[in-house]
Image (cartoon, grey):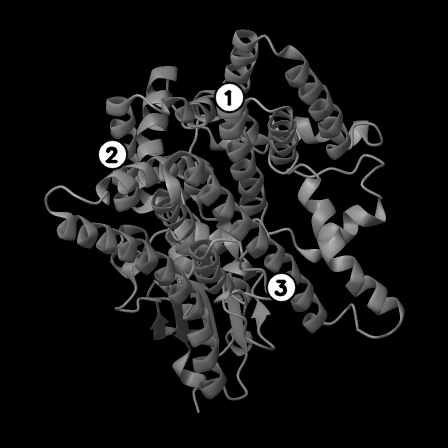
Amino acid sequence: MRAELKALLAGALVLYVAGIWWGVPWQWGPDELAPDYIFGAIEKSFAGGWHDKYPPMQYYLDALVITPFAAAGRFGWVNMASLDTTAAMLIAMRLLSVAMTAGAVAAVYLTAAELYGRRGAVAAAIFAGFTPTVVFYAKLANVDAPSLFWVACALSFYVRAVRRGAARDLLWYGLTSVTAIATKDQTAGFFVLPSLHLAWLAAQRREWRPLVTAGAVAVIVLAFELGIPFNLEGFRSHVHVITGEASQPYRLPGSTWTRQSAVAALTVAMLGWSMTWVGLAAGVAGILNEVRRRRFLWLLLPAISYYLFFLVVAGYVYDRFVIGIGFVLAIFAGGVIDDLLQPGGRWLRWRRVAWAAAAAFIVWSGLSMDLMMILDSRYETARWMQLRRGTGRVGLVGFPPYLPHIPASVRLLSGPDDYPAADQPKFVIVNAEVMRRGTALPPLERAWKEWLESGRSPYVVAARFKTAPAVSMLTYTDAFRNGIEDATTNLDKVGPEIVVYWRPGVLR
């Protein structure tokens, strides 16, 4: 392994592992595959109609990670019902995401090295793997980072297959593509146009047999990864979920033209957020550089394909949806950086300084995500409460993963008028950003919000906590400053504004 790739992976692992304990075991991470979900699938042997909103591939891999804990539990070595064991299993699942994200960075590096050499590969890996969105999802047990590992691998084999046409590259392209799909359905969008491109090249080269063989093997593997031979009903149920309740409510409103205009604008905005605007600018510069030099523009096909065959069809965009497009743009960015750093010509020293500044900014943005997670306001709230609660009760309003973990606290499941004065808790804690959801706020939370902010409530604000370290780049972004939840990203679920209300009559 090349020295620079080792250094890149070491740096990436530091970023990904730092803060990996965030929200463990209280499941602050949005859409994580909790150990209970995996054990539920294992108990049904991934058959008998078992299904979820995600395909089963990552469930298989997570099962391999946590099954040893179950074996240890059978021997009485660990208590499977304890929070410590749950935390250890979730950390193990998150470490799998860490490893797969590092693998994705390595795949981007190797792809860029194939096209642009070692300088371009280093730049591409930094633009792809050190951004806040990647750092955030790398340390969670979601399907996002694992699916992107398979996408990055498929992208690498696609480049090799285009340039060399070797049968093994076509086979590995097919296998990694379908495994990406079996991890997260939407990744299928990446492979429509590249697969047609490879078919066109096979026709030009008159070498159909390797492509047909690779395609047949890939289809068979996909069928087994999706569980179709042994869980057809579960597969049907999964398709029903992803085409209905798991997607339809999120489609942008309006006419087709209005929706698609919004999808286009959001795609650009989310790329700027996900890659940072520095990374997006470098990617666009790389594409323009390829237009001028007419070399590898076909590399845009996976990104265009994903936009046309997923984002346009889905009708909505989140930051995590565009990370794969960001990988493609990062490779183009590597190309323009390689040209920028070519010896000779004017301003070489200043060109190097510009690249160093861009790389430093990207790394700072990734470190900023770690800092926000490590210093999450919910930890500070819990410490504050530990020093001041005394013997008084603490009530939590809202969904627990949005709130701090306060030992012996109670979740308030009735409206404020249902609690006589004698039964009212000493402290009431809310997530202020959730409380600002407006019409989307559930009735119970809305009742507490209106009551706490009215003149009828005996409570006053005792403390506010918000993660905003001065050295974090994210502190200065709208998503973390505006005090409301951003519908297009989960990153601002880190370090929310937590408000502690206190009833003065019971303070001692």
> What is the x, y in percent for residue 74?
88, 67
- Quadrant of the rendering where the C terminus is positioned: bottom left
Q: Which residue is mark 1?
A: 194
Check the image and name the residue furthest to the left: 346
Based on the displayed image, in which of its 4 quarters is residue 388 positioned? Answer: bottom left
Q: Badge 1 local density, few (<14 within 10 Å), some, or many (20+)?
A: many
Q: Which residue is mark 3?
A: 91
Provide the secondary structure element on which disc 2 rests. helix
**Residue drawn at (43%, 25%), measured in percent from left and top?**
307
Give 12 or 387, whichever is nearer the viewer: 12
> What is the x, y in percent for residue 336?
27, 37
Q: Which mark is residue 285?
A: 2
Q: Amino acid at mark 1?
A: Pro
Front position among marks 3 and 2: 2
**Residue drawn at (67%, 27%), measured in percent from left and top?**
239
Are the two marked residues, 3 and 1, in contact with CB atoms closer than 8 angstroms? no
> What is the x, y in percent for residue 359?
29, 53
Q: Is residue 83 left or right of residue 199?
A: right
**Residue drawn at (61%, 25%), measured in percent from left and top?**
170
Q: Earlier in the sequence, mark 3 or mark 1?
A: 3
User: Gap in Å between the C-alphas at discs 1 and 2?
Assistant: 22 Å
Based on the displayed image, in which of its 4 quarters is residue 114 positioned? Answer: top left
Q: Amino acid at mark 2?
A: Ala
Give 76 or 350, whichever is nearer the viewer: 350
